[in-house]
Amino acid sequence: MRAIPLAIGLLILANPLVAQGQRHNKVIKLMGSRFEITAIHEDAQTAWDGINAAIAEITRIEKLISSWDPNSQTSKINQNAGVSAVKVDRELFELISRAIRISNLTDGAFDISYASMDRIWKFDGSMATMPKADVVKKAASKIDYKNIELVDSNTTVYLKEKGMKIGFGAIGKGYAAQKAKEVMITLGIENGVVNAAGDLAAWGRQENGEHFKVGIADPKNKEHIMSWLDVNNGAIVTSGDYERYVMLDGKRYAHIIDPRTGYPTTGIKSVTIICPNPELADALATSVFILGKKQGIELINQLYGIECLIVTDEDKILISNNLELSDKS
């Protein structure tokens, strides 16, 4: 069993007697994932202008950070690893800088240079055996955020070792959700949701004037909502292994790679982070997965305004000190 994904758990309830506007939403595949963008506004044209602007913004960000597009700035950084520094837009420079700060915060549990492992582990059902230890070791030797050199004066990025790669799989969708939210607010959407495959940013209120709510399923019965979380102008991000994992020799390996070892994480099924910003929440969800339940909870308990819910492999639920759950929808 698992915690319910946010795409299912999000409730937007209509009540025309106290309506703040009509709900308009679009489901679309972006960044290789399912996005659902919701705008609540009395004017349909304004709502759809906001939704379309959000889609355009997410598409722009994907082109900037994609490591699969050979022409993206991120790909150019990777192509020049161990060769030369690459000048990038200030936006990408700052995103990488924030990622490195999170690496420092988590003692390397979060590391965007994990991407050197992208050819080793497959979570599409094609893997039948463990990769050889020496292959994992060689790829993991290229992971080290301390070898990402940033020069602020001319916004250049240099990967010091040949074979190094950076990737934004653990922070990119959260960043896109935040930027899409900002664009929609600029266009007058005061109530809305951007759900980027479980990286959710919500602001304002739903049609009935209440906060948006996310349901958390009972791990022993996924059809039963055991508790609810209010999303009050903030973000909720869930990272889980319920869709992408591999079973090898009877052991379940999550799709999240520990950059310190080069091997997938074990012991946790899902991590939910409640945080003001979806970019930070995205990165912390991955970090807690890697740190494990004990160290992960300890980290979150030290961070002001950030909470955490973990579902372990044994279907036990662990929560941070100040997380408030409700049994009412």
Image (tube, rainbow, N blue to C red):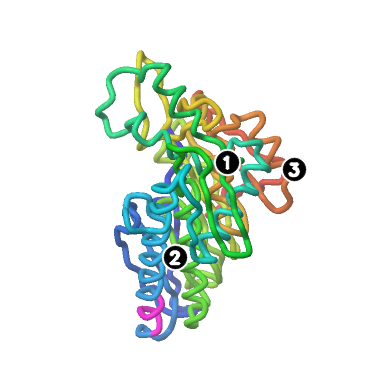
- Label 3 – label 2 distance at C-alpha: 35 Å
Q: Which residue is mark 2?
A: 13
Q: Is residue 282 magenta?
A: no
Q: Circle 1 — which element?
A: helix
Mark 3: which amino acid? Answer: Gln
Q: Nearer the viewer, mark 3 or mark 1?
A: 1
Report the magenta residues as a range: 46-50
Coordinates of residue 186 in the picture (x, y in percent):
51, 80
Mark 1: which amino acid? Answer: Asn
User: As rendered, which of 318 and 154 lies closer to the eye?
Assistant: 154
Most frequent secondary structure within the magenta stretch: helix
Looking at the image, do the residues carrying marks 1 and 2 touch, with CB atoms under 8 Å apart?
no
Residue at horizontal 46%, vertical 25%? 263
Q: Is residue 47 magenta?
A: yes
* Residue 320 as seen in the image, left or right of residue 88: right
- For label 1, count other residues whose C-alpha is less than 10 Å away and answer few (under 14), some (14-19) or many (20+): some
- Label 3 – label 1 distance at C-alpha: 27 Å
Mark 2: which amino acid? Answer: Leu
Coordinates of residue 147 in the picture (x, y in percent):
58, 41
Q: Which residue is mark 1?
A: 147
- Label 1 – label 2 distance at C-alpha: 48 Å
User: As rendered, which of 18 and 129 lies closer to the eye?
Assistant: 129
Q: Which residue is mark 3?
A: 302
User: As rendered, which of 65 and 157 lies closer to the eye?
Assistant: 157
